[in-house]
Image (tube, rainbow, N blue to C red):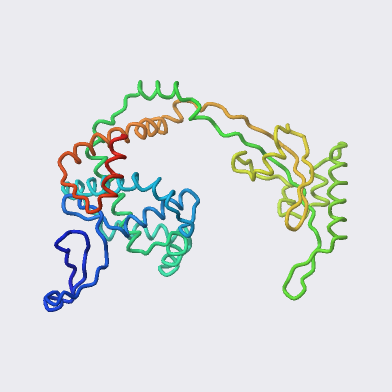
């Protein structure tokens, strides 16, 4: 059995050999949207890109509508053609993505997520709706495109220290230390019982725990040592450290806690917070306001930021050259028009 491209170039067919072809018996398994230098981009590939793009926007594939598709599809078509051109250029350069490179990536992925081979397959399908082979295809495409950018654009991306210094001075807001807060916690659990496999809380017990945390907060606010109150009353694992927690970036805290802490200064104590199984209060131990990092410590990040800003326009120049040399054959007028309209807006 072999793949045969249809003569009209619209579909790829799977035929059972010359005899079946002579009888006109073939099964359409794919629809071609465009050929770029003879290489095809298909309807199923576009559909997958549409699903991925909508998922990145927080939308479900089950809620697809035509308005969403009309909005995102032109950019996806441009990206698909550009990807084919860059991958083809990589092949011309002799770039290859081999089994060893793929194994190195998947081994790290499995190690970081504590998965075996089967577990990785399950997680890919569950989280990304992706097979191992599709993962490899994406990694290979990314690797080859990056290789082309490094080869074709890299030599023009040499950046002097003076350019780095100027960028740093003009974009200091990008190189700030984060705002952090250090807290001590005091936690009071709400007693519960388990009946028929369900964890239940008695309203009276919840009220008693609430009163206890409120009384403890009042005592702390009146000057009692917070660390001693933690040692005598807290039921959190942090009790052994006097309730002390590591410094947190404010941006990483839950929105409700960010709002509660607000602009509280060191020594201030929050109002009680109710969680699923108990109540907490926090004492602000320290705050750190954002500061500009010294140039010498962020020079690599400055260099990377400049290259990142220059990469896209330089890549577009490369793509303009590749497009001018390419044979692009559209097999669907609707998609061709969407592509051309989007290109005209660039």
Where does residue 302 sit, x and y in percent of width and height? 41, 30
Q: Is residue 197 left or right of residue 204?
A: left
Q: Is residue 275 above or below residue 269?
A: below
Residue drawn 75% across and 76% down? 196
Q: Is residue 87 above or below residue 103?
A: above
Q: Nearer the viewer, residue 235 or 228?
A: 235
Q: Quadrant of residue 219?
A: top right
Residue drawn 21% across and 47% down? 90
Residue drawn 32% across and 57% down? 45
Where does residue 133 sit, x and y in percent of width and height? 32, 63
Q: Is residue 56 left or right of residue 192?
A: left
Q: Is residue 104 left or right of residue 218?
A: left
Pick the quarter of the image with the N terminus.
bottom left
Pick the quarter of the image with the C terminus.
top left
Q: Nearer the viewer, residue 66 or 164?
A: 66
Q: Is residue 292 left or right of residue 159?
A: right
Where does residue 327 sit, x and y in percent of width and height? 15, 46
Total residue callouts:
0
Q: Quadrant of residue 74?
A: top left
Where does residue 321 sit, x and y in percent of width and height? 19, 37
């Amino acid at each position: 059995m072999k793949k045969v491209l249809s003569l009209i170039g619209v579909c790829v067919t799977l035929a059972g050999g010359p005899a079946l072809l002579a009888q006109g018996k073939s099964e359409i398994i794919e629809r071609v949207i465009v050929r770029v230098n003879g290489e095809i981009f298909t309807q199923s590939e576009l559909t997958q890109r549409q699903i991925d793009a909508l998922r990145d926007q927080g939308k479900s594939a089950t809620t697809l509508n035509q308005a969403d598709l009309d909005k995102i599809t032109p950019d996806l078509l441009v990206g698909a053609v550009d990807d084919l051109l860059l991958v083809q250029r990589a092949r011309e350069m002799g770039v290859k993505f081999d089994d060893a490179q793929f194994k190195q990536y998947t081994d790290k992925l499995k190690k970081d997520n504590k998965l075996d081979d089967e577990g990785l397959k399950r997680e890919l399908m569950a989280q990304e709706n992706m097979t191992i082979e599709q993962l490899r295809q994406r990694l290979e495409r990314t690797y080859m495109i990056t290789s082309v950018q490094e080869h074709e654009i890299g030599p023009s991306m040499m950046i002097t220290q003076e350019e780095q210094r100027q960028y740093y001075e003009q974009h200091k807001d990008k190189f700030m230390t984060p705002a952090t807060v250090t807290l001590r916690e005091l936690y009071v659990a709400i007693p519960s019982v388990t009946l028929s496999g369900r964890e239940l809380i008695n309203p009276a017990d919840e009220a008693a725990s609430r009163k206890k945390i409120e009384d403890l907060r009042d005592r702390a606010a009146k000057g009692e040592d917070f660390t001693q109150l933690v040692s005598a009353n807290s039921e959190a694992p942090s009790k052994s450290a006097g309730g002390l927690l590591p410094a947190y970036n404010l941006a990483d805290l839950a929105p409700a806690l960010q709002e509660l802490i607000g602009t509280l200064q060191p020594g201030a104590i929050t109002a009680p917070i109710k969680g699923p199984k108990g109540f907490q209060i926090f004492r602000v131990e320290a705050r750190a306001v954002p500061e500009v990092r010294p140039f010498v410590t962020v020079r690599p990040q400055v260099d990377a930021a400049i290259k990142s800003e220059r990469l896209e326009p330089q890549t577009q120049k490369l793509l303009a050259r590749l497009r001018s040399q390419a044979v692009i054959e559209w097999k669907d007028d609707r998609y061709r028009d969407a592509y051309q309209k989007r290109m005209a807006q660039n």
